[in-house]
Amino acid sequence: MDLWQKVDLLGSAAQWDTCQGCGTQMHRHADDLGRWIYPAVRPDGRRVRLLKVLQSSVCQNDCRYCAFRAERDQRRTAFTPDELAHLVDDLYRSGRAEGVFLSSGVCGGTHRAAERMLATVELLRRRYRLNCYIHFKLLPGVQDAVVESALRWADRVSVNLEAPNAQRLQALSGAKDFDGQLLGTLRRAHALREQLGSRASLTTQFVVGPAGETDAELLQCAAALYDELRLARAYYSAFQPVASTPLEGHAPTPLWREHRLYQADFLLHTYGFAASELVFDGQGRLPREADPKLTWARQHPERFPVEVNRASRSELLRIPGIGPATADLIIERRRFGRLRDLRHLGLNSLGEHRAAPYVLLEGRRPAHQLELWSAPGRA
Ligand code: SF4
């Protein structure tokens, strides 16, 4: 198999891993190789184009949802570290990619598989002296030495928890041990990061749906990780069944559920909400019909309306329609005078519509809202 066939096989293989903030396939480049280059968001908010690829699509494990499970009959291959490092160097220097997201099947044992991945990134940093962005996926249960090297060479390291707890993971994989290999590796990565003074960020990913987990379980797990491990992000991947796997007959997870999970997750890591404040139904599900912040606001009339001219940043962030950038803008604008009109808040029309019922401007309800309220009474 030549290098380009490998790129196609291992690039297409990596598409199944939808974590680390990569965009959907819709945003990929149109040319042949560019099909495997995805936009991703760095911890500093800058967007980068990453080659998303597997070192190897050979795997000894049999995770029930996975396209690379050992029992699945499919064509497989692997890059040597030299091949992959050369490819990334070429893409970087020609301006087609700004980095790599590297994952791998577990081939020849976790340690050997991780060593091949490490050899690739070490070549990139040492031989090619490439200052590209590197996201390194830690394989379950890797040794501390591997974690340390990954923290040294990569900008971001991640461990996919896949499920929010050990019991749920059993429905997805008989090979992975939640407390030891997954959460344990994430914890060791955090501890070593602190010890080494590494600036690498830490992320994880959940497969949403097939384990029967609730939204509440997922978000409580993510909230604990944000608190305990200073996790940069948790990613939620709506399950899509793969042919010839034990879960091929399982219904796909609707994308609206993934969307609601991301909205609620933003409340946790950006808006200062505690997991206990999120509103779920009796089965631990986020409501489908309204976003989680609006749902919370509707349940807390005692917290509204908020006087925009006096509210703290955290109070502003509780108002539907107002995000961090708008909250900062409002605080900046208050230095120059009183805000008396919704248009002074810097919101778009949807944001104004959302915020209107929940704010006071100089002690008055916005005119926008008064019009809405008075509409039914008009002749
Ligand atoms: S260990 Fe990873 S690549 Fe292997 S079957 Fe499980 S999810 Fe797939």
Image: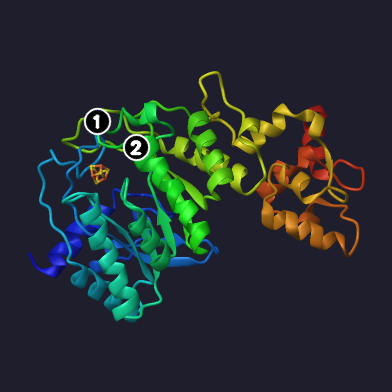
Does residue 197 appear to the left or right of 348 in the view shown? left
| Mark earlier in primary sequence (2, 1) | 2
319 shown above or below 149? above
Q: Which mark is residue 247?
A: 1
Cβ at disc 1 under 8 Å from ligand 1: no
Which corner quadrant of the image does residue 208 belong to? top left
At x 25%, y 60%, the residue is 115
Q: Secondary structure at mark 1?
A: loop
Q: Which mark is residue 222?
A: none
Which corner quadrant of the image does residue 117 belong to? bottom left
Q: How many neighbours does mark 2 have within 10 angstroms: few (below 14), some (14-19), or many (20 or more)?
A: many
Rendered-image quarter of ligand 1: top left
Residue 125, position in %: x, y?
Answer: 35, 75
Does residue 294 appear to the left or right of 8 in the view shown? right
Colour mode of the rendering: rainbow
**Does the rendering let one see residue 94?**
no
Q: Are marks 2 and 1 in contact (CB under 8 Å)?
A: yes
Residue 182, position in %: x, y?
Answer: 37, 42
Q: Residue type at mark 1?
A: Leu
Which corner quadrant of the image does residue 303 belong to? top right
Residue nearest the observer in this picture, 259 or 18:
18
Q: Which mark is residue 239?
A: 2
Residue 355, position in %: x, y?
Answer: 74, 43
37 shown above or below 282? below
Marks 2 and 1, Cα distance to the nearest angstrom?
A: 10 Å
**Quarter that holds the C terminus:** top right
At x 54%, y 34%, the residue is 220
Does residue 61 appear to the left or right of 213 in the view shown? left
**Does the rendering let one see residue 159?**
yes
Residue 133, position in %: x, y?
Answer: 41, 69
**Quarter that holds the N terminus:** bottom left
